Image: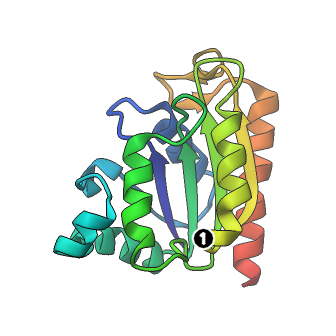
Amino acid sequence: MKLLVFAASNSAQSINRQLATYAATFVEGAEIEVLDINDYEMPLYSSDREAAGGVPVLAQAFFDKIGSADALIIAFAEHNGSYTAAYKNLFDWTSRIDQKVFQGKQAVYLATSPGPGGAQSVLGAAVTSAPYFAAEVKGSLSIPSFYDNFDLAEQRLTNSELQAKLRETVASLTTETAKA
C-alpha cells in the first residue's frame, strides 16, 4: 500500500505532522511518503488570478500525489477553530482542478493541539466535508493536550489509552484498504 501522509499545516515544527507521521508507523508494510505542504506554496487563490494565469502547476502536482496514493493520513492543525490559511489555499487551488480533490481515497483524519480541545473543531469540519471532496474517511481521532501526551524525543504517544485509540483508528484504514 502506498500511504500519503501530511499535516494541514505549514509550521516547520508542526505537531500535526509529528502525529501523522507517527500514526503511519502503524501501517505495516506500507510505502510511506510524508509531504510538507510548504513544497506546494502558491499565491492566495482568487478567481481573478485563476482567470489570468490558470491553476498553478503546484496544485496539479499535489493533486497527482493524492492520485498516486492508495490511502491518506491527514492531520489537521487548527487556527481559530478552522483550517490553516496555508492548507485552505492549497486545497482551494487544487479543487479548481477537480472538486473531488481526494479522488475516492480512503483516509484517516487526525488532529491535535496543545490545548484540551485537540483541534476538534477543524477535525469535525474536515470529516463532515470529506464526502463532498471524495475522501472516504475510515476513522478520525483528536489528540488533546499534545505536549502532555506525546514524547517529542521518542516521537510517540505516551498516553496508553490514546495510543490504543490511534492504533484502532489507523487499523480501520488498513483493514478496509486491504479489502478494496
In this view, the residue in front, 19 or 54, is 54
* Residue 117 place in picture, x, y as percent: 71, 24
Position above or below: 171 against 94:
above
* Residue 150 place in picture, x, y as percent: 60, 24
Q: Does residue 25 appear anywhere in the picture?
A: no
Does residue 8 appear left or right of residue 159 in this picture?
left
Q: Residue at x 32, y 66 (%)?
A: 47
Quick one: which residue is furthest to the front in this view? Answer: 48
Does residue 42 appear left or right of residue 84 in this picture?
left
Position above or below: 24 against 60:
above
Name the residue beneath numbered marker 1.
133
| SS at badge 1 | helix
Callout 1, which amino acid?
Phe
Does residue 138 appear left or right of residue 28 in this picture?
right
Quick one: which residue is furthest to the left in this view? Answer: 53
Q: Residue at x 73, y 56 (%)?
A: 128
Quadrant housing the N terminus: bottom right
* Residue 124 place in picture, x, y as percent: 72, 45
In this view, the residue in front, 51 or 44, is 51
* Residue 21 place in picture, x, y as percent: 50, 46
Position above or below: 28 against 67:
above
Quadrant housing the C terminus: bottom right
Q: Does residue 158 appear anywhere in the picture?
A: yes
Position above or below: 98 against 29:
below
Quick one: which residue is furthest to the bottom in this view? Answer: 180
Q: Residue at x 46, y 22 (%)?
A: 153
- The image quadrant of residue 65 is bottom left
CA neighbours of label 1 inside 10 A, class few (<14), some (14 to 19), many (20+):
some
